[in-house]
């Protein structure tokens, strides 16, 4: 199980769940948030892992805090 808090930078691992939806194999991945400016090397690794997963995805559901949409999109455009 992952440690989750409202503090930015907590999530670092990619958590994957494999599902069978009406006979279709689906993998849902929860990743670290994408944000710029962190100097924490461990958080930077989590962000790079998130970007790697996103680059190989067929579909991305990008969930953001509505008050931070523009800054989140800047990082998302790296995919």
Image (spheres, rainbow, N blue to C red):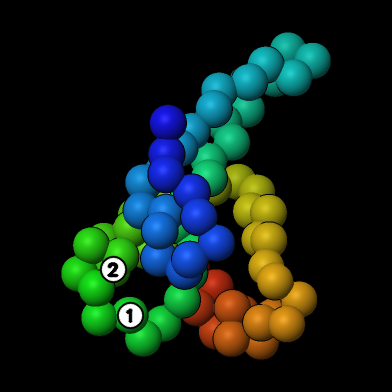
Q: Distance from label 2 to label 1 (Cα)?
A: 7 Å
Residue that numbered label 1 is attached to: 38
Disc 1 secondary structure class: loop
Q: Residue at x 54, y 27 (%)?
A: 17
In the orientation shown, which residue stands out farthest toward the top? Answer: 23
From the top left corner, tell me how far across and down residue 40 is, in percent: 24, 73
Q: Where residue 55 is drawn, which disc sits there?
A: none
Q: Nearer the viewer, residue 73 or 46?
A: 46
Q: Please tell me which residue is depicted at 33% across the width and 58% down the height of the picture.
A: 46
| Quadrant hosting residue 62 | bottom right
- The correct choice, above or below, for 70 with respect to 19 in the image is below
- Of residue 22 and residue 69, the one placed in the foreground of this image is 69
Residue 15 higher or lower than 51, as above or below: above
Residue 44 lies, in percent from the top left, at 28, 68
Q: Is residue 56 visible?
A: no
Identify the residue position indicated by label 2 in the image.
Answer: 44
* Marked residue nearer the N-terminal end (2 or 1): 1
What is the residue that sits farthest to the right in this orientation? 22
What is the quadrant of the N terminus in the image? top left
Task: Identify the residue at image location x=55%, y=23%.
Answer: 18
Q: Quadrant of residue 15?
A: top left
Q: Residue at x 42, y 44 (%)?
A: 3
Q: Is residue 66 left or right of residue 76?
A: right
Return the x and y of residue 73 as percentages of the image width and height. Answer: 61, 79
Q: Position of residue 26 (x, y in %)?
A: 62, 27
Q: Is residue 3 left or right of residue 38?
A: right
Q: Residue furthest left?
A: 41
Q: Secondary structure at mark 2?
A: helix
Please name whichever residue, 29 or 3, is drawn nearer the observer in this view of the structure: 3
Instruction: Confirm or deny contact between disc 2 and disc 1 (CB under 8 A).
Output: yes
Indicate left or right for 16 with 43 as reference: right
Callout 2 crowding tier (Cα within 10 Å): few <14, some 14–19, many ≥20: some
């Amino acid at each position: 199980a992952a440690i989750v808090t409202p503090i930015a930078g907590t999530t670092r691992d990619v958590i994957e769940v494999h599902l069978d939806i009406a006979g279709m194999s689906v993998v849902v991945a929860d990743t670290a948030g994408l944000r710029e400016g962190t100097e924490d090397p461990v958080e930077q690794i989590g962000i790079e892992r998130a970007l790697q997963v996103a680059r190989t995805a067929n579909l991305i559901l990008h969930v953001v805090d509505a008050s931070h949409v523009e800054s989140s999109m800047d990082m998302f455009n790296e995919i």
